[in-house]
Each structure stands twice: as C-alpha cells, then as structure tokens.
Image (cartoon, coloured by chain):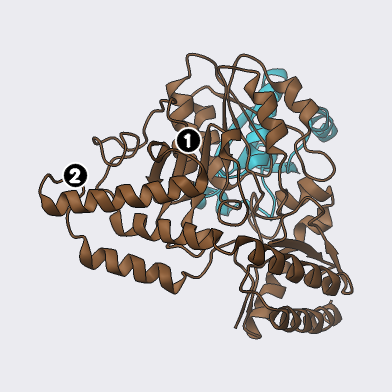
Amino acid sequence: MKVIKITAVWCSACLIMNKRWKEIESSYDIETISYDLDFDEEDVKQYDVGEKLPVFIFLDGDKELGRMIGEKSIDQIKEFIEGLN
Amino acid sequence: MVYLDYSATTPVDDRVIESYSAACKRFIGNPNSLHKLGLEAKEVIDASTKQIADILGVKPSEIIYTSGASEANNTAIKGICLKYQNRGKRIITTELEHSSIIAPLNYLVTLGFDVDFVKLDDKGRVDLKNLEELMDDDVILVTIASVNSEVGIKQPLEEISKIVRKYKKCFFHSDMTQSIGKEKVDLSLVDLASLSAQKFFGMKGIGALIKKENIVIEPLIHGGKSTTIYRSGTPQLPLIVSLAKAIRLAYDDFDDKQNHIKEIHDYLIDKLSKLDVDINSNEYSINQIVNFSLRGIKSETMLHALEKDDIYISTQTACSTGNYSMAVFAVTKDEKRSSTSMRVSINYLTTKEEIDLFIDSLSKNIKKLGDLR
C-alpha cells in the first residue's frame, strides 16, 4: 500500500506521529511518500489538505482508500489500516 | 482602535523608541573596536547588560543577545543537543510549545534524536508523574514553556525543575517569551530561558537567551566573539539599549500594573461568560491571556468581522493549516472548540471601555453570523 504523509516542521502532532508511523511501517507493507506542507507546496496542492495535520492518505494505485488526520494512537492507526481492507 | 492582541506583539513604548534613537545617534562605534568610540560603545552595552541582568537576577555573562525568541529557542535547543549528543539523544517537551520549539525538535529528529511529549493534565499542566516516568539518563534536554501563548496556561516550573535536577546530565530550558516582562520570574529554576522584547513594549528584532554561565553550547552563528562567543555578529547596540529600557519599564510599578490587569481580566471573563462562547483559559492561565471558542462560527470569520469595527484580537493556528488549535485541544479535548478558538490578550494599557467595545462587537457579530448559519 502507498501512503502520502503530509506534515509540517512546526507541528507537534506531526512530530508525535512521525515516531508512531515508523513503528507502523515496520509492521505493515507500506511505501510512504512524505511531503512537507510548506516546503513541498506544489506537490501538496493536489491533495486538498484540510485544517488539521498530519494527514495520511492511503492509496491503492491512484485510488484513495481513506484519510487519517491528526494525532492517533498506535492502536487507532492499526484499526484504521485494518479497516481499509 | 481597540488592540487586544498584546501576546502577539506590543506597540513600542515611546520611551523605548527614544532610547533606541538616542543610542543610534550618539554611539556610532563598533563595540569591538579598540578606539575611543568603540570603547564608549562597549561601555554602554556593558551598562545595559548589567541593568538587564540585575532585573532578571542573573549574571551579565549569562545573557546572549539574539534577534528574538525564535533564535533564542533555536540556539538553546540545537546548542545543547548538538554539544551533548554523546551523553544521550532524548529530549522531552509538551504539545503546548511554540513552533520555534517544535521546528528545531523536528530537525533534530532527522539527526537521530528522539523526542517524547510529556502528558498534560485536564487543565493543560504538565503531568509531573508522567514526567518522572519519562526521565532517564539518556534525556539531555527538557524544554517546556513557562506560559503557553494560546491559552495562557502557566506550568509548574518549580516542580518540573525539581524533577529535572535529579538528572545531572540533563538541561532544563524554558521559553519564557510570554512570562518575562509580564510576571516575575525565577530564572534559578532553569538552565536556559528565552525572551523577546516585542512582548513587553520593546523593539522587534531583539531578544535574549539566558544561559547559566557554566554551560557550554554549540553556537548557531559562528564568527568570533561578539558580546559572547555563542552569537557572533556586530553587537546590536541600539537594540540592546532599548531592551534594557523596555525591561526596566516593564517591571516599574509592577504591582499596580498587575492589579489593573487582574481587574480587566475579571471584567472580561464576566462579560464573556454571558455570551454564547466557551472559555478555554482556566484558573492556571495568566491574566493577560483569555482564550475562548465560538459556537458554530469560524474564528477567522469573526476576526474579520471584529476588524471592521477596528477591534483586533487573534486566532491561533499552531499545528494547523486553518483554524484548528492543537493547544486548545490539548487543554479542552474538544474538537469543536479547537476549531473555533480566539485569543484576547490584554495589558496594563487595556481599559474597561475597550473591553465594552469588544464585547458589544462580539455580541453583535455572534448574532449576525449565527443567523447566517
């Protein structure tokens, strides 16, 4: 599964989630493409990011399977991923 | 005009502008020059530094002038972590920190550092038990703001300091941008503290990092000795003189100012509590900051509606691309309130008449914008 991860350097929830996401990446077959909201403005534009960060967009090819937004616990992330299948 | 955004920045006191202007005209030498003009300039900087140090209860050698609090925070965090990375790689902070704390921490993570966030209690204060659990010999830095800029929550620095002090290899930094000049501070509780003059009627472009004399850090700006080896560049003499003036004025008639602010704060809370809003600040918030949430109206929409009446408050958008506030969520655990929060920040210049004008406009616009829902 491909995941677009959108964060920002000034975002505390993004910093919290970065650590948890590394743990998730080691348990699932995930390819993460990371974008920074400010530095990668052009790339991020196409994803219609809302008001809250971080944003994880789960893709099957080009098809969006779902979005996980904001700070989540490891269990919540797992539950979300398993709910996509 | 009704300005109620003093925590974002303050207007510069005329007396501070005068001291800045006089210093610009009178002291033209580079303080590092050996001739008479240079020595005069150095003497003025030394005298200003001593004044600031005396007011803050630190040594002159413990003051590192910076361009503001963001540089001070970066200097403290990167300076400690890069210098002491062989001792450990862990850093502890909170979700209530300013972006100039979070961004350098994000950078340090890319260098292999590990950041943990201490839990907050239901009032937004550091959970001391959790801090004790998180601490170990691998933690080299704890960085916790004395007062959060959005909700105004004041942290128990004395208790936090006691916990951090048990670990000899760990340093304690506090971003005191919302404290210094607004409340009396005890800098003996921390190893490093950041301040910014523009929060207490000083000039923009000058701040300081207070660093205990015996602590060595890695400088951000290399280039030889200035007023200190930790921040190179020609010393910004007029700004330093203006900082000394601003900090002296901030603590003049301090108790009278505090009493006035308390009276205005209580008046504001009383008026706000009668409107259709939720107040997010609590008993641990400083009197200068009152954060509240609108019900079903976007804060940015309200900000511009108030602006039309020449009233200026702020929406805080830390960790957000729009109106969402992580700090308000951390304190309230309420998603809706976190999306519609606004901050009023007052100071000793604020009057009851200004609060009345603000409340009248807010009340009028709540009705008007609410009807459009």
Relative vertical location of residue B161 with respect to residue B369 in this rendering, above or below:
above
Which residue is pictured at 47% across the width and 70% down the height? B13
The chain letter for the residue carrying disc 2 is B
- Amino acid at the residue labelled 1: Ala
- Name the mark on residue B32: 2
Front one among B154 and A43: B154
Query: Where residue B203 sits: x, y (%)?
Result: 42, 63
Q: Earlier in the sequence, mark 2 or mark 1?
A: 2
Is mark 2 in CB contact (under 8 Å) with mark 1? no
Report the mark closest to the observer, 2 or 1.
2
Query: Where residue A83 sits: x, y (%)?
Result: 85, 34
- Amino acid at the residue labelled 2: Asn
Q: Colour of chain A?
A: cyan
Front one among A2 and B9: B9
- What is the secondary structure assignment of the residue under circle 2? loop
Q: Is residue B260 visible?
A: yes
- What is the secondary structure assignment of the residue under circle 1? helix
Figure label count: 2
Relative vertical location of residue B321 with respect to residue A25 in this rendering, above or below:
below
Tell me the brown chain: B
Residue annotated with mark 1:
B76
Relative vertical location of residue B369 with respect to residue A22 in this rendering, above or below:
below
